Image (cartoon, helix red, strand yellow):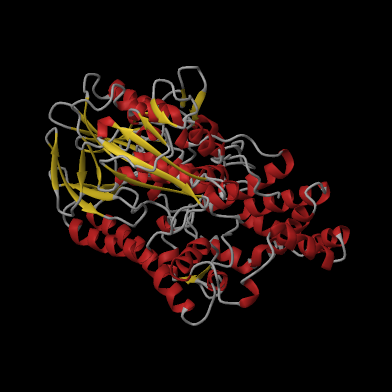
Amino acid sequence: MTPINRRGFVTAAAAVAVSPESAAALGQTAGVSDQSAMNANELDFSDDADFKAADKGFIAALEPGVVKNAAGDVVWDNDAYDFLDGDAPKTANASLWRQSQLVRKQGLYKVADRIYQVRGLDLSNMTIVEGDTGIVVIDPLISAETAAAALELYRDNISADKQVTGLIYTHPHVDHYGGCRGVLPDGAGDVPILAPEGFMEHAVSENVFAGTAMTRRSIYMYGAHLDKGPTAQLGCGLGQNISTGTVGLLEPTKYVSETGQRETVDGVVMEFQMTPGTEAPAEMNFLFPELRAVCMAENATHTMHNIVTLRGAQVRDAKQWAAYLTESVGLYDGQVDVAFASHHWPTWGNDEIVALLEAQRDLYAYMHDQTLRMLNSGMTGKEIAEEFQLPPALAEVWANRGYYGSVSHNVKGIYQRYMGWFDANPAHLWEHPPVAEAKRYVKALGGMSSAVGKAREFLREGDLRFAATLLNHCVFADPDHQQSKQLLAQVYEKLAYATENAVWRNFYLTGARELREGVKQATSASDSSDVKAALSVDQLIDAMSVRVDGPKAWDLDLAIDWYLPGQATYWHLRLKHGVLTRTSGSAPNASAGLTLIMSKVQLLQLLAGKGLGSIQASGDVTLLTRLFSVIVTPTADFNVVTP
């Protein structure tokens, strides 16, 4: 979210809405005038309704608020955010500080009769609904360890003997399924697991095909390597952080495919609303008609969400998102007394629920429609983001503030969805890549000393945005130039301290840290054995195909058959012209130079580099070696703020 300008509108000149202290320090930073900074702080900070809602129904907290794995390593530490007590310091945006104070609240809460939530033990919430004999768990967090701690907190305070009799995934992001083995450590067994249609495809593909790059960017987005404190990571806006425990994936036993579909699990009646293409490709809200409660998944939370997430993902459909929220109002108005979501705190009261859904509906619809209006007038994505204005009636709603998504990057995402990366200006059609461009800019500016000097001038004038641009060119032109790296790190810190958006803050601060300290090692959700096992054979081959080093494989021409007796299917792999393709059928390929007969487990072991083992092989086994020789292993440790 961004500051309010003199006309009383919110402008996307930057995702910066500064506290009075920060405004005094930054002056004209990022195009934010003193007047706009003052108006941004006319938000009603005396309004404590969200704090009352976040505390409502509190039963008990986890003491201490720390979760460890079996080896004794800390995988979650909510107590690290105790510094958020008190007023916002000069190094934090007051609105973001307020959001972080709300989100760091931790413990077991009663939402309604038979409905409980555990909040503050991961990025997401875990919801527990009491059934006839046991409990139905909704969204079991990221890690088995945090999910187990959340379940134990419920059992210690409510019912020690209730077993999990149902599990529901609202959508296929890892913070909504990864902790499944913390609530079902022995697997599903006879326990039904419900999920929206398409769940498995998206759960595994998002973590595999572009998983390495997403993992690297997620470190920036969530500030995973940052310290916690007033000058460091404050949270993520959507939650405080991501846990680092054991990620699992238990396959759903039943898929929900239609709006209006009714399912009963352990006596708990649910009516579903399908919302594909909103916050996730497969997602669903659901009503508990007998309990007068509705789960809004991640479609209506207490922040502006992402139309395009900065970690990287396909652009979401803001128009469709708004349309589904309109449908939600029609479905739930008069039917509910409480709405809860997979993040943040619930909303009580039918009128208040409708107001939240309509405010978020109008937020996404306005961003969509006005972006289309402006692009059809010839404006580019950057120009739209700079000039975009939200009506005060939408901007003043706390739940619409840009703590996670922002007006600036969301409208650019909408532009991207319709128009792609190119703004039609021929000068942008064939630009130099970053290093080559940077060297030319530095040369044009009279050399490194001159370029850094000009950056300092813009810094003194308060134009941190252009100072960052110039210094970024300096760093890419000469990554060993310590003066430019250190100065750029300082500029990033100043931008971080001003922004209302938690994700932008984390990006700036992570960039500053890596300029000073280098890159730390990353891990990926795709490393989970459950995720790997959940991949179909087709997906495994597709995952290999995007790792083929094309130029290295130009001259290879080979054909290999994989036969899995358990599936009674031959997979025909062909590597030619640097492209790995696949077909499948019930008969072998007569031109295959090698045939491997194996189980799915053996295939996974083969792809993990454990060799043929007991796999039956007939033909030229060197073909396998030649194939694997051109398949590269991606790394999530690549540079971002340096070349």
Q: Is residue 433 above or below residue 216?
A: below
Q: Residue at x 69, y 46 (%)?
A: 512
Q: Residue at x 27, y 30 (%)?
A: 565
* Horizontal side, residue 413 vs residue 59: left or right: right
Please state the total of marks drawn on the protein image.
0
* Horizontal side, residue 149 vs residue 92: left or right: left
Q: Position of residue 479 (x, y in %)?
A: 77, 49
Q: Is residue 82 above or below residue 478?
A: above
Looking at the image, which residue sits at the far top? Answer: 71
Q: Position of residue 283 (x, y in %)?
A: 30, 50
* Horizontal side, residue 4 vs residue 449: left or right: left
Whether residue 85 is visible: no
Whether residue 257 is visible: yes
Residue 472 figure quarter: bottom right
Q: Position of residue 535 (x, y in %)?
A: 36, 38
Q: Residue at x 15, y 53 (%)?
A: 260
Say which of 276 and 100 sits in front.
276
Say which of 296 and 524 sits in front.
524
Residue 387 figure quarter: bottom right
Q: Is residue 521 above or below residue 68?
A: below
Looking at the image, which residue sits at the far bottom? Answer: 377
Q: Position of residue 107 (x, y in %)?
A: 38, 31
